[in-house]
Image: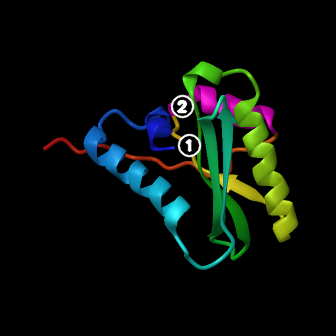
């Protein structure tokens, strides 16, 4: 799964330290797989010819309004299987898991500049809810 982590960097603001971003993303995936943390968690993996070609991780996140939502921490698909429905099937598995857990919503984050991901999620019925704004301060 760690071989696909580089796909998670797409859309990250270019001024963010690439090595720090990579390290954080590696840690997220390790935590999702290894963690015995509290609350429901799931990892979905897509394989082709014995090789992992995609994965999605799910857990929970509290919305500021107090709701507990299912949360997709990571979704990554190998370039070699793009546009073949792998990401869609992983998201559908995540949504099915969330329904089974009794959640009313599935939430996720993606980079503002990641137009492909934003289009993909919109096509699946996801709506943009929050926007984070950042101003770089020159040194």
The dominant secondary structure in magenta is helix
Q: Is 23 rendered above or below residue 115?
A: below
Q: Is 65 rendered above or below residue 76?
A: below
**Residue 80, image x and y in percent?**
59, 20
Mark 2 secondary-structure assignment:
loop
Is 79 positioned to the left or the right of 71 in the image? left
Label 2: how many Cα within 10 Å (few below 14, some 14–19, many 20+): some
What residue sits right under mark 2 in the picture? 114
Is 91 positioned to the left or the right of 58 in the image? right
Mark 1 secondary-structure assignment:
loop
Q: Are marks 2 and 1 in contact (CB under 8 Å)?
A: yes
Image point 35% across, 44% down: which residue? Answer: 22
**Residue 139, image x and y in percent?**
13, 44
Q: Farthest residue toward the left?
A: 139
Is 81 positioned to the left or the right of 139 in the image? right
Stretch of the chain drawn in magenta: 113-124
Quadrant in which residue 97 is drawn: bottom right
Front residue (pair 107, 2):
2
Q: Which mark is residue 110?
A: 1
Label 1: how many Cα within 10 Å (few below 14, some 14–19, many 20+): some
Front residue (pair 112, 32):
32
Q: Which mark is residue 91?
A: none
């Amino acid at each position: 799964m760690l071989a696909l982590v580089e796909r998670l960097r797409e859309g990250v603001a270019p001024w963010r330290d690439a090595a720090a971003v990579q390290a954080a993303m590696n840690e997220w995936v390790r935590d999702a797989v290894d963690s015995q943390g509290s609350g429901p968690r799931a990892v979905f993996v897509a394989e082709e010819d014995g090789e992992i070609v995609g994965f999605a991780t799910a857990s929970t996140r509290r919305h500021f309004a107090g709701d507990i939502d299912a949360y997709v921490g990571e979704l990554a698909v190998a370039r070699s299987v793009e546009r073949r429905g792998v990401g869609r099937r992983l998201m559908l598995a995540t949504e099915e898991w969330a329904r089974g857990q009794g959640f009313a919503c599935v939430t996720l984050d993606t980079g503002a500049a990641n137009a492909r991901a934003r289009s993909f999620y919109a096509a699946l019925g996801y709506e943009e809810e929050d926007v984070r704004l950042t101003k770089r301060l020159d040194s």
